[in-house]
Image (cartoon, rainbow, N blue to C red):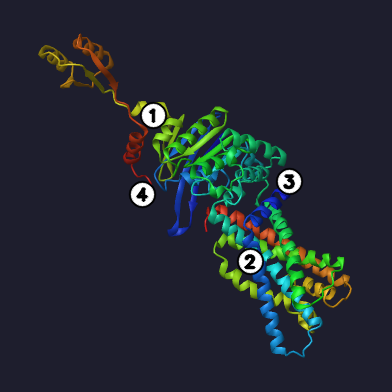
């Protein structure tokens, strides 16, 4: 399994770096979109408005959004690309079994995404003047966030295996994610305060905002619920992905697109 | 090596129901090349994918070295495949990188995969191109890399779906030579192709599938013999005398100038040769069917049992 992880890391890195213009343009686009959002928000609010903590939350929300979009779309988009280019069936010929291979791929692409995220965050902070705190404990809610994120990624991957064309859903999903990740529902009152624990990733993003933007400590009870949320969505994703693989093999549509 | 029994595959339900493969059984032994032939849509690719564990059969079972790829993923360690219409390779990666990656994906330790990859590149004459991204290689070279990748984990069974499709003459000859070598190493090779000359050259046995059902399966040689007629074509140097023409015609042959056609028994052939003496012979040839004729005859003659 270590060899598989190493091989996936190497493959992901080589495919990423072989055409450097793609890498640079990708980062520039993420930054440009953010800068556009940021300056228009400043314009509407007027020059006297101080963003303060809110600006940090905006920076963090946007950074998380870009990370989770890439994590969520990762499996579905790659499944579709590989079906089109004709490598998908070779992947399904692995004695490791597809879920383990795609899990290793998920880890490999996560490593790459985190690297890009760090670069983007540093650049965003430089552009906006925002200063985020990075206490090591934030790795805990980040892990539960990513577990739920990859759970959704496997669910979308399962959709790609069975229904093939999922770009439309992925497009709509991005905006839904922006709401899920950037809206500070942890500040809301009433029923939503409880319902947010049922939605994927929401409990983890609230904790990340506490740690990085509000300089609060980690609430362990809330974290327990966030971790449970991550585990449940991850397990659900893997379970549905296995079902989708069996269904695609039954229909003989594994390599279709 | 391979024992596939009564494989059937049904797609859809109700009015959409379509039986793509009907009770197909195939066996393949060590070092044997089986050419799996059939018209487009006959069920070749579906059968190959059922053997590889990529399409689940509605009925029947597959055993590769005694293991079922549908129930035991480790059975896939015995299978290498180059699938038609697929690139089978990562185009941004070089041949060396592809070999190492797919080796690990097939559970070969990384260092062993790297070493075996280099050996295969040397054996396939691709050493100079080992650092060139696959997308920059010619179609023939890409196909050689795909076959090398299919061999990286030392499989016992190699599935080749149209391995010479779209290749020029030279590349096609190269691939044929490789398939021969691979079989000589003791691997079983299941080959589908529309190029029947390729099948005739490479295969020990032939299975012909039509509308999902196997309509012929036997050794290539015996199939060709069965469909070969006992007509002989003789050519002589110079004209025959009227007496010779009379005798030859009496024996059942027809004469057209220096060409004689004889469709009698092999024993009487010697009487015919005696009658021709002392005119020098240029050639004696027996009509031999080729696989194309056999294939067309079988595919056209079979009654349509599915209606």
- Closer to the camera, A111 or A162? A111
Kindly identify which chain the residue marked by label 1 belongs to. Answer: B
SS label for mark 1: helix
* Residues under numbered marks 4 and 1 in contact, where contact means CB atoms less than 8 Å apart: no
Image check: B296 left or right of A78?
Answer: left
Q: Image quarter for residue B235?
A: top left
Local packing at callout 2 (Cα closer than 10 Å; few below 14, some 14-19, many 20+) is: few
CA distance separating discs 4 and 1 = 27 Å
Residue B150 placement (x, y as % from top left): 58, 40
Return the mark for residue A3.
Answer: 3
Residue A180 placement (x, y as % from top left): 71, 75
In the rendered image, residues at marks 4 and 2 fall on the same chain: no
Which mark is nearer the camera, 4 or 1?
Answer: 1
* Residues under numbered marks 2 and 3 in contact, where contact means CB atoms less than 8 Å apart: no
In the rendered image, residues at marks 2 and 1 fall on the same chain: no
Kindly identify which chain the residue marked by label 4 belongs to. Answer: B
Which mark is nearer the camera, 4 or 3?
Answer: 3
For marks 4 and 1 on the same chain, the one whose residue lies earlier in the sequence: 1
Q: Residue at x 35, y 37 (%)?
A: B298
Image check: A33 left or right of B195?
Answer: right
Is residue B177 at all visible to an observer of this figure?
yes
Return the mark for residue A25.
Answer: 2
Q: Residue furthest left?
A: B242
Kindly identify which chain the residue marked by label 3 belongs to. Answer: A
SS label for mark 2: helix
Find disc 1 in the rendering and name its residue. Answer: B223
Residue A85 placement (x, y as % from top left): 54, 54
């Amino acid at each position: 399994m270590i060899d598989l992880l190493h091989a996936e890391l190497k493959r992901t890195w080589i495919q990423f770096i072989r055409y450097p213009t793609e890498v640079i343009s990708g980062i520039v686009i993420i930054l440009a979109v953010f800068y556009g959002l940021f300056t228009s928000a400043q314009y509407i609010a007027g020059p006297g408005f101080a963003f303060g903590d809110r600006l940090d939350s905006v920076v963090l929300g946007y950074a998380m959004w870009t990370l989770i979009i890439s994590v969520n779309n990762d499996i579905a988009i790659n499944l579709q690309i590989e079906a089109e280019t004709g490598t998908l069936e070779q992947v399904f010929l692995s004695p490791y079994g597809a879920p383990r291979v795609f899990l290793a791929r998920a880890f490999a692409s996560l490593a790459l995404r985190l690297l890009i995220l760090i670069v983007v965050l540093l650049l965003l902070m430089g552009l906006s003047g925002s200063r985020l705190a990075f206490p090591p404990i934030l790795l805990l809610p980040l892990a539960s966030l990513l577990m739920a994120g990859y759970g959704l990624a496997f669910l979308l991957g399962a959709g790609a295996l069975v229904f093939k064309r999922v770009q439309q859903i992925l497009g709509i999903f991005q905006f839904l994610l922006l709401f899920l990740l950037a809206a500070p529902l942890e500040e809301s009152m009433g029923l939503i305060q409880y319902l947010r624990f049922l939605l994927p990733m929401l409990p983890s993003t609230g904790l990340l905002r506490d740690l990085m933007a509000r300089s609060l400590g980690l609430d362990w009870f809330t974290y327990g619920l966030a971790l449970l949320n991550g585990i449940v969505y991850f397990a659900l994703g893997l379970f549905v992905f296995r079902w989708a693989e069996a269904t695609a093999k039954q229909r003989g549509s594994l390599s279709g697109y | 090596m391979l024992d596939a029994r009564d494989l059937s595959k049904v797609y859809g339900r109700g009015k959409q129901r379509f039986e793509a493969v009907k009770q197909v059984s195939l066996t393949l032994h060590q070092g044997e090349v089986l050419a799996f032939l059939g018209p487009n849509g006959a069920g070749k690719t579906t059968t190959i994918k059922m053997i590889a564990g990529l399409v689940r059969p509605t009925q029947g079972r597959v055993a590769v070295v005694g293991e079922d790829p549908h129930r035991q993923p480790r059975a896939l360690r015995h299978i290498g495949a180059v699938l038609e219409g697929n690139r089978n390779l990562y185009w941004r990666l070089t041949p060396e990188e592809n070999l190492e990656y797919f080796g690990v994906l097939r559970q070969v330790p990384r260092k062993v995969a790297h070493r075996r990859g280099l050996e295969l590149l040397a054996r396939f004459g691709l050493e100079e191109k080992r650092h060139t991204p696959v997308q920059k290689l010619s179609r023939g070279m890409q196909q050689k890399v795909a076959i090398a990748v299919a061999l990286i984990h030392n499989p016992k069974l190699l599935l080749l779906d149209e391995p010479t499709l779209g290749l020029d003459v030279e590349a096609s000859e190269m691939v044929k030579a490789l398939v021969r070598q691979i079989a000589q190493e003791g691997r079983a090779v299941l080959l589908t192709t529309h190029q029947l000359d390729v099948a005739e050259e490479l295969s020990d046995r032939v299975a012909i599938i039509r509308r999902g059902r196997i309509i012929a399966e036997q050794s290539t040689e015996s199939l060709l013999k069965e469909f070969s007629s006992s007509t002989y074509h003789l050519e002589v140097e110079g004209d025959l005398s009227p007496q010779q023409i009379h005798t030859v015609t009496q024996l059942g042959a027809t004469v057209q100038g220096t060409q004689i056609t004889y469709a009698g028994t092999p024993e009487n052939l010697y009487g015919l040769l005696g009658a021709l003496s002392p005119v020098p012979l240029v050639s004696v040839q027996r009509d031999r069917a080729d696989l194309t004729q056999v294939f067309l005859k079988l595919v056209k003659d079979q009654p349509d049992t599915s209606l």
